[in-house]
């Protein structure tokens, strides 16, 4: 059911030491992020989104995914980053949280990476609070670092509590 | 068949089948306490229900097997194949009795003494021959064999039998409730041994060999068979039905889309099959709808009793007539209108109907009539609540409305009688003052209206002074599919439920209808009335700061209860049938939307909530001078309390949380009696002490005196006041610390400094033992500490919450342990938890035990609050992890302990 690219390459030459975990890789700005593959429902291209007036700024609107209404979350606003200004249309990763579907709008979605747990690390203490709040840790890849999103905290923002 | 009985049969058949399975499991896992507990509970339920329904045979059998299970549960009896077999046998007997019951609606003649005897024997520790009794369990056609033959004496130790005989009391046809063996009647038992020489024959001639007149045994063809009633109905999870309903709704929408397409294409080959599809879909929708339908009589079942009690309390003769009780409506809707209906019937009986003499004087018959009538009309169900009482007095309502500032005096004179009557639906318009014989809480009709509007219904009032009042409630049959008008504003489309839309008006400069402005506020002249307008664009902040009021616009006129408002939109499209889907949790707090849906073209659209629009457009302004922000703020905050304002001893207004007040009464001072110098009055068959705000006040000897009645359980206390002023909704924000023991503090309520009284103080005066000591020397923590209060008694919640609030704690209250667990597991934070012990469902011990299992709550102080403080309770409390244990009535101890444990 998922439109995920089927390739599974780590690009790693190190010997596997721990358990392998799979992540859908995401680019936002110049940073690589990952979402555990089991939490991902779908990967979508650009969609027609209905704006929702009076909603929190992180909510971009809602869209129809095969008959289900999905709330679109603008990850850039969630991370207090400037709006996306790339040339091609953005993409979305649909995740499920407590029975509700959310479409996370990102710049682009890459391949699925199988990562060795041995490469996992806690955040550096100096990491930007915006990102630290929504992630569980960092994987050291050969050429870059991948920040793992925690979907639950990604979806927990002010709007939820505001009365 | 009697509905109760048929329900019992269905339920018990289910339970027995479940028991069969569970017992076999138990045999395999004799140590599974949870399983055993469940079995015990089920049997107990069967026994209890049988007793309730007056089915002695069933009850006796269930009771005897419960005894055996009880012994097993206590550990005094081993789970043995024999015991299980015997219990299974008793279930077979129960099944047989049930099927016979189903057929004849009465229990069959005879008794089950033999079976009970054997059960009791086992319960007492005796052993049975494993070979004989179980025969019927293994048998493909189990016959409730209960012949004493099963009891092969040779294999039962004689000592045990002997002992059983010695202990057995005298003859007893009805098995008693004693857990001991008692039924083994001596004579019978002896006889039981008699047929022993014959080899056990579990079948046939049983009836002959049976001792006394044991029940005529079921013949082969009459054996236990599947209950026909149980087979006619199945229980289906409501969620499943809801799900089915949603799916069907989607199907209807798809059908509608297809029909739309087909209409545009003439002579298509799809036309005929499509019509067939359409028809089937409609039938399917109807069918599924029916599964959710229940007769409205279910919501009325409590009313006759209510009216009867009221008529006795108020010494009026009231006749309640209910017509159309079998009118069906969606169960979801039914649930939602139950309370409003009850409230309104109570109102009619209480305020509407006059007492006998007054009725006779008015030329009516002595007995007043309250009529409930329900019937279908179009896609709606109409419920009328009619009384032939005194009707609403427009003058009194007008005066009250003016006094409350709902309307200016000059305006009031121009209002029609109908318009004046509508005031009773306003929030804060207490009927207490509107109608003289006070016994209601004085809140209500606004809540009733809100509840009915929530489900897309409307309520109308027709009243003729002196003749009676009629309330007409109109509610949709179902909530699942609604017709909606699609409009556009600021480039976005929105759906407005058609039910609220009265008309569409196109306004432009050169047409009859012109948008005008009053100090920047747009209004529309519509049939000689001014209609307030709101711009949907502005309401939804889609206007980019564009302040111009457009000269040309479409205006959707909404009627929300009695309030009309015009919504300016850019375009109006078609109407569509839509399925309301709830919005994502992150968006639930936007009150302007009631849901969202997917339109025929596949796009998502937000559904406007007319009530939210009304609230946002400032309807509440008329009630609350502070304006819409405060009003919305207030209506959507959970910590708003209803306060009763009154005057007593002194000029400054006083207030008490309305929830604490059970009733408002006017007592006849001539009926006041004195005991030890303290005034008492007979109230509802009991003596109720009267307490004055001020000791110096002497009661008059005649006339009428308003009192606030506080009630807890059986006890009532009346607080004497001079005048009941109003009921307001406000947050209690205690600003000035108290200097008198009877005062919780002062707060600004309805714009005036108001003394909030401590009901607890007066309760102490009335009943010394209501609480420990009265004066509270509250500890004050430096910053607000969060406290969770779990208590199922609304009274204690309402009493303790203000007490803690005034001591500076931030209190959250829940009325049951499940809610508390949910909060605690859901990430809420509290510095301490105060919990009642005895609560339905999870009790305080269990709650604490579970909380202590969660790492985050391991060290949080949890204080038990209970009226029972025996040493055993204390021990158990310590065991599960209570930090401290305090008597419910000891407020000082509570505050002190709380302060100590939090800071510790």
Image (cartoon, helix red, strand yellow):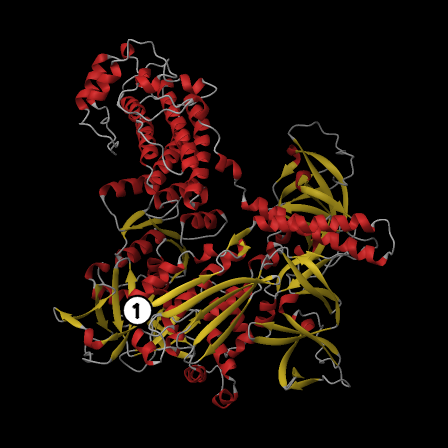
The correct choice, above or below, for B732 with respect to B843 in the image is below
Instruction: Say left or right for B720 vs B373.
Output: left
Helix, strand or loop at disc 1? loop
Instruction: Say left or right for B312 vs B261.
Output: left
Where, by quadrant of the figure, is residue B739 drawn?
bottom left
The correct choice, above or below, for B524 with respect to A147 in the image is below
Residue nearest the viewer, comparing B344 with B319:
B319
Residue sticking out furthest to the bottom: B410
Residue sticking out furthest to the right: B267
Counting from the top left corner in percent of width and height, residue B191 is at 24, 17
The correct choice, above or below, for B654 with respect to A131 in the image is below
Residue nearest the viewer, comparing B250 with B29:
B250
Residue sticking out furthest to the left: B676
Disc 1 target residue: B314
Residue nearest the viewer, comparing A135 with B895:
B895
> In the rendered image, which quarter contains the N terminus of chain B?
top left
Counting from the top left corner in percent of width and height, residue B682 is at 21, 67
Residue drawn at 66 percent across, 66 percent down = B498
Counting from the top left corner in percent of width and height, residue A159 is at 60, 59
The correct choice, above or below, for B717 with respect to B66 in the image is below
Does residue B441 appear anywhere in the picture? no
Query: How many numbered marks, from 0 up?
Result: 1
């Amino acid at each position: 059911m998922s439109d995920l690219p089927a390739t599974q390459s780590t690009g790693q030459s190190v010997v596997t030491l721990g358990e392998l975990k799979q992540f859908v890789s995401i680019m936002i700005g110049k940073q690589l992020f990952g979402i555990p593959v089991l939490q991902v429902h779908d990967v979508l291209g650009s969609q027609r989104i209905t704006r929702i007036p009076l909603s929190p700024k992180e909510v971009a609107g809602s869209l129809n995914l095969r008959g289900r209404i999905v709330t679109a979350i603008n990850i850039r606003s969630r991370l207090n980053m400037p709006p996306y200004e790339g040339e091609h249309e953005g993409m979305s990763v649909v995740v499920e949280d407590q029975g509700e579907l959310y479409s996370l709008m990102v710049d682009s979605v890459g391949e699925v990476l199988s990562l060795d747990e041995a490469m996992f690390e806690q955040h550096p203490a100096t990491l930007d609070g915006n990102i630290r709040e929504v992630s569980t840790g960092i994987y050291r890849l050969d050429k870059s670092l991948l920040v793992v999103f925690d979907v639950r905290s990604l979806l927990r923002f002010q709007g939820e509590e505001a009365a | 068949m009697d509905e109760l009985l048929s329900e019992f049969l269905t339920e018990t058949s289910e339970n027995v089948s479940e028991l069969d399975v569970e017992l076999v499991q138990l045999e395999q896992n004799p140590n599974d306490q949870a399983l055993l507990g469940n079995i015990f509970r089920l049997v107990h339920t069967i026994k209890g229900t049988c007793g309730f329904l007056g089915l002695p045979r069933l009850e006796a059998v269930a009771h005897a097997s419960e005894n055996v299970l009880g012994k097993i549960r206590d550990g005094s009896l081993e789970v043995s194949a024999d015991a299980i077999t015997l219990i299974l046998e008793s279930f077979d007997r129960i099944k047989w009795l049930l099927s016979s019951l189903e057929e004849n609606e009465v229990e069959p003649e005879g008794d089950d003494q033999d079976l009970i005897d054997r059960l009791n024997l086992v319960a007492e520790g005796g052993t049975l021959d494993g070979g004989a009794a179980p025969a019927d369990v293994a048998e493909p056609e189990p016959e409730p064999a209960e012949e004493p033959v099963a009891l092969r004496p040779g294999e039962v130790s004689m000592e045990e039998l002997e002992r059983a005989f010695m202990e057995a009391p005298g003859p007893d046809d009805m098995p008693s409730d004693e857990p001991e063996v008692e039924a083994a009647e001596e004579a019978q038992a002896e006889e039981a041994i008699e047929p022993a020489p014959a080899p056990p024959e579990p079948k046939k001639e049983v009836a002959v060999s049976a001792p006394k007149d044991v029940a005529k045994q079921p013949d082969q063809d009459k054996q236990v068979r599947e209950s026909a009633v149980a087979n006619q109905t199945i229980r289906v999870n409501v969620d499943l039905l809801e799900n089915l309903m949603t799916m069907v709704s989607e199907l209807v929408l798809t059908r509608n889309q297809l029909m739309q397409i087909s209409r545009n294409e003439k002579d298509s080959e799809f036309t005929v099959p499509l019509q067939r599809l359409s028809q089937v879909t409609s039938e399917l929708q109807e069918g599924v709808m029916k599964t959710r339908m229940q007769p409205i009589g279910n919501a009325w079942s409590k009313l006759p009793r209510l009216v009867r009690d009221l008529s006795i309390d108020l010494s009026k003769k009231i006749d309640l007539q209910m017509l159309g009780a079998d009118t069906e409506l969606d169960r979801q809707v039914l649930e939602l209108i139950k309370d409003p209906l009850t409230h309104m019937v109570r109102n009619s009986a209480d305020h509407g109907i006059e007492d006998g003499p007054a009725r006779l004087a008015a030329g009516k018959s002595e007995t007043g009539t309250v009529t409930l009538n329900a019937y279908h009309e179009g896609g709606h169900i109409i419920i009328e609540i009619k009384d032939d009482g005194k009707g609403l007095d427009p003058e009194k309502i007008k005066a009250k409305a003016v006094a409350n500032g709902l309307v200016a005096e000059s305006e009031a004179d121009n209002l029609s009688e109908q318009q004046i009557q509508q005031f009773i639906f306003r929030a804060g318009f207490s009927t207490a003052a509107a109608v003289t014989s006070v016994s209601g809480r004085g809140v209500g009709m606004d809540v009733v209206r809100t509840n009915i509007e929530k489900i897309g219904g409307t309520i109308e009032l027709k009243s003729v002074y002196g003749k009676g009042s009629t309330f007409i409630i109109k509610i949709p049959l179902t909530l699942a599919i609604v017709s909606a008008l699609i409009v556009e504003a600021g480039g976005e489309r929105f759906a407005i439920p058609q039910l609220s839309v009265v008309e569409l008006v196109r306004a432009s400069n050169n047409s009859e209808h012109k948008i005008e402005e009053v100090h920047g506020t747009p209004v529309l002249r519509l049939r000689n009335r001014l209609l307030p307008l709101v711009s949907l664009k502005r309401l939804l902040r889609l206007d980019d700061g564009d302040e111009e009021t457009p000269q040309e616009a479409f205006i959707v006129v909404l009627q929300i209860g009695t309030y009309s408002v015009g919504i300016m939109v850019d375009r109006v499209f078609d109407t569509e049938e839509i399925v309301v889907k709830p919005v994502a949790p992150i968006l639930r707090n936007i009150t302007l939307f009631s849901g969202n849906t997917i339109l025929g073209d596949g796009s998502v659209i937000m559904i406007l909530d007319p009530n939210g629009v009304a609230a946002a457009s400032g309807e509440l302004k008329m009630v609350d001078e502070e304006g819409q922000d405060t009003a919305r703020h207030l209506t959507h905050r959970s910590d708003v309390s209803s306060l009763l304002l009154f005057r007593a001893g002194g000029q400054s207004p006083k207030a008490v949380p309305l929830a604490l007040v059970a009733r408002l009464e006017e007592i006849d001072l001539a009926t006041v009696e004195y005991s030890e110098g303290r005034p008492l009055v007979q109230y509802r068959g009991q003596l109720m002490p009267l307490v004055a705000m001020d000791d110096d006040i002497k009661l008059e000897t005649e006339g009428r005196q308003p009192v606030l009645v506080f009630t807890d359980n059986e006890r009532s206390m009346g607080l004497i006041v001079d005048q009941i002023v109003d009921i307001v909704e406000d947050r209690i924000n205690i600003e000035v610390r108290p200097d008198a023991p009877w005062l919780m503090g002062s707060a600004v309520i309805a714009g005036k400094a108001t003394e909030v009284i401590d009901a607890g103080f007066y309760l102490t005066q009335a009943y010394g033992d209501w609480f420990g000591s009265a004066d509270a020397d509250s500890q004050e923590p430096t910053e607000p500490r969060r406290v969770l209060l779990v208590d199922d008694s609304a009274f204690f919640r309402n009493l303790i919450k203000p007490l803690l609030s005034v001591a500076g704690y931030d209190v959250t209250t829940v009325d049951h342990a499940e809610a508390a667990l949910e909060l605690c597991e859901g990430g809420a934070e509290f510095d301490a938890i105060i919990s009642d012990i005895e609560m339905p469902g999870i009790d305080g011990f269990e709650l604490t035990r579970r909380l202590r299992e969660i790492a985050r709550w391991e060290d949080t102080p949890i204080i038990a609050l209970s009226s029972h403080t025996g040493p055993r309770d204390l021990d158990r409390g310590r065991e599960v992890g209570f930090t401290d244990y305090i008597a419910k009535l000891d407020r000082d101890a509570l505050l002190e302990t709380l302060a100590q444990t939090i800071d510790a």
